[in-house]
Every structure is written in structure tokens, then in C-alpha cells.
Image (cartoon, rainbow, N blue to C red):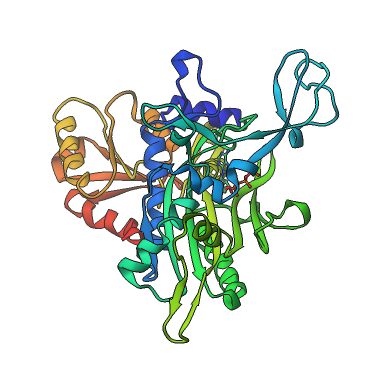
Amino acid sequence: MDKLTSLLKRRGFIYQGSEIYGGLGGTWDYGPLGVELKNKLKQSWWKKFVQQRSNIYGIDASILMNKDVWVATGHVDNFSDPLVECSKCKKRFRVDQIEGSICPECEGELGDVRQFNMMFKTQVGSVEDSASTSYLRPETAQGIFVNFKNIIDSFHPEIPFGMAQIGKAFRNEITPRDFLFRAREFEQMEVEYFVTPESWEENFETWRKDIIEWLRSVGLTLDRLHEKEVDGDELAHYSKRTIDFEYDYPFGRKELLGLAYRTDFDLSRHAKMSGVNLEYFDQVNNDHFIPHVIEPSFGVDRLVLALLLDAYHEEDVAGESRVVMRLDKSIVPIQIAILPLMKKDGMSEYAKNIFKKLSNNFVCHYDETASIGKRYRRQDEIGTPYAITVDYDSLEDNTVTVRERDTMVQKRIPVDELQGYFEEQYKFLN
Ligand code: ATP
């Protein structure tokens, strides 16, 4: 994990938030390669669960919401984690992350258990009073529920139908840790899928399969994925069934995403608190009811981390070690690297011309520094599946070398066939 995090910093994937000021706990900044990877992951999700589905509606709701939203859902009263404080060093810990009553940092005595609300409170407008209190949303789901009526009124969908959103969520975690895994600011991709109360089980099963299929499509190693039925005390009071999809991180088997049957809890609460009728009218059966909800909730950053951990490989090539990031082609930050063998004799210009053409359709990277071997290694390290090399022969016969990341096989391809060749390699993306 340490090797991966240092590579990710060095190569511009992920940096510590506010680093030059000593950082801010639980915040991470995505660099140029990280943001490409994260965007591709989000696009893939959006395509699979919104664009390729005729009955799922995408939205992008505000992060700041009326505080009554969070009163209605119980977050103001209950969205808390139990914490204990060390009487000596004053550090705070989540109760479920420590053993015994001794501080793991300084061996001081830990105090009594207290509840700590994890929502970030803020003030909207210039007058500071309780009416102006707002919160940074701790989940994207509620932005969906408060727009339920808008979607009904604009699109008149037939049940079952869903609403989807990708966006930031904020939780004032007591002990952010394990890199991207437990952050205070992170992103979620969530669907609220509205169903009749009678059909929740079949829809739950369908979602369960769809989740796995999509995870497979972005290259997650399914051997490291495990489903855990949440039961007993751990099950939220409004949920009749929840599965945590856990992943084998180097720091343990931990929740990657959740699939929950949330009954009609959220819509009923919002109808009550807002006084707005949030019933669905089933014209076929002439029936008014509050739909029930199946919710797949993906953590973008936890998935980015899992995919990077899966992809990171160290191997021996002819006595030399090579680091290769075997990311799936659908999510690689750079799709094609373009490398002139040397800067001189017109090779740069020739290669730049290829860059100009291919970058209309692919994410390309142009690099003319250092030896060609070093440049190949650099591209392997960031997961670039193909590298094009322009050499002296190119200037003569208009062919280039295309090298594959995984096999390291090199083949000669005419320049005017490059576009078609890469369209073929990346055709599954369209
Ligand atoms: P945990 O028990 O690990 O705190 P949770 O059960 O509270 O997680 P949910 O409320 O189900 O998490 O949130 C849905 C998803 O959002 C999680 O499966 C995870 O992928 C992501 N997520 C939640 N909290 C964080 C966090 N602090 N940092 C990064 N991702 C998070």
C-alpha cells in the first residue's frame, strides 16, 4: 500500500489535501491522472445505470439543502458515531476502532463514550441564527428524494423507475484513515430505485447482479469481493435488508459499497415533514401509494482505491523490475502515449502531428524526455495500454511501432491506420 500511495503521489494521481499547509485530515486532491481515472469510472457508471436504462433519471442536486431534510431523515438526531477521548493526549477515537480503555497512541486513560454527529454544519446567509443553519450533505441520496416529485411531474414515469446521482458527500469522520478509504470529503454514486412494496425482493436480486456485472466491466478482481448480509443491530432501523459488498483491502476486508432495501422510509418522512404529497399514482390499478426503494450506493473513492490496488503489479523483466498498472482499458487515465525516439531530425514534429490527430478521439500523452526504455516504464507505471514510437523508419515509410503495456509486444503499423487500429482497441467504450 505504501508503494502504491507514493507512486500515486509521484505520478500525479492523488495528493494530500492542502499539503503545503501540513494537510487537512481526511481530504485528498486528485491530480491530472487521478481525475482522468475517476472521471472515466463515473462515466462508465453513468452510462451503465443512467444512459443505457430507459427508466432511470439522472440529476445533480445541491450539496447544501434545507436543514429540515436532515431533521426529517433523522440525521440531525442520529447520524453519529460513538467516540471516546483520551484524558492525556486528547485524541479522539471511534469506539469500534479500538480495543479496551487504553489510548492506542499514548496509553492514557480513555474517557466515557459520547455520541458525535458527523454532519458538517454551516451557515447560509449573513444572519447567524438557527434558521440559517445548513449542513454539507452526508449522502447524495436525499438530493434524489427531495426531487422525486419533480421527476414524476416532468416525466410521468411508470413504476419501477429510478433516479441517479453522482456527487460529493461530507462526513466529519472521527478518525479518517486508510488513504481514500475513510475520508471526510468523498464522492458517491447512488441510485434510488422506486418499486412496489410487493416487488422489492426481485428488484433487489436484479440490482445485486447488475452491481457485480458493472464491477467486473471496470476490471475489479471479483475474488476479492465479498457479500456480507447485514443483520441484527447493524441493520439500519428503516432497512429490511442490506448487503455490504466488501473488498479485501490491505488493511482488512472492508465495505466498498452497499445495497439496501430502504422501504418507504425516506419518502414517507419527507412527505410528513414537508406536507407535500409524495405518493405515486398507479393508473393501471388506480392506486395511490408511497413507493419502496432499493438503493445501490457506491463510494467512488473506495472503488478507485480498490481498482488501483488490483492493478498494481511488480514484475521481473529480463532481470529488471518493472511496475505495471494493469488497469482495465475502460478506465485508464491515458489511452495512448506518443513517443518520438529522439527529438532531432523531424521525429518530434512527426510525433506531434500524430498526437494532434489522435487526441481528437483519444486521451493521449506526448513525451519526448529521457530514453525510450525509461519512457515505456513511465507509461507502464501509470497504466497506459499503448505507446506509439516514432523512429527514423517512420520518416521513410510512414509506419510506427505500437507497444502493448501487458505483453510488451511491439508491432509496426502504418500511420494512416492508427486511427482505425485504436478505434478497434477501444470500441467497447462506444
Ligand atoms: P462505514 O461503515 O465504512 O463508515 P457506511 O456504512 O457508513 O460506511 P454508507 O452510509 O452505506 O457507508 O455510504 C455508502 C458508501 O459511501 C459506502 O459504501 C462507501 O463506499 C462510501 N463512504 C461512506 N463513508 C465514506 C468515507 N468516510 N470515505 C469514503 N467513502 C465513504
Quadrant containing the N terminus in the rendered view = top right
Give the residue displayed 37% in from the left and 52% down from the top: 43
Q: Ligand 1 is in which quadrant of the figure?
A: top right
Of 333 and 321, nearer the camera is 333
Q: How many marks?
A: 0
Give the residue displayed 33% in from the left and 56% down from the top: 426
Q: Residue furthest bottom?
A: 285
Give the residue displayed 22% in from the left and 53% down from the top: 419
Look at the image and tell me whether residue 390 can be seen: yes
Q: Residue furthest right?
A: 100
User: In terms of image quadrants, where is residue 380?
Assistant: top left
Residue 313 x %, y % = 55, 39
Residue 37, above or below 83: below
Residue 238 x %, y % = 65, 59
Of 355 and 397, nearer the camera is 355
Residue 155, above or below 106: below
User: In terms of image quadrants, where is residue 259?
Assistant: bottom right
Residue 247 x %, y % = 64, 48
Residue 250 x %, y % = 66, 38
User: In terms of image quadrants, where is residue 178?
Assistant: top right
Look at the image and tell me whether residue 315 can be seen: no
Left or right: where 311 falls relative to 340: right
Quadrant containing the C terminus in the rendered view = bottom left
Give the residue displayed 42% in from the left and 28% down from the top: 11
Of 192 and 301, nearer the camera is 192
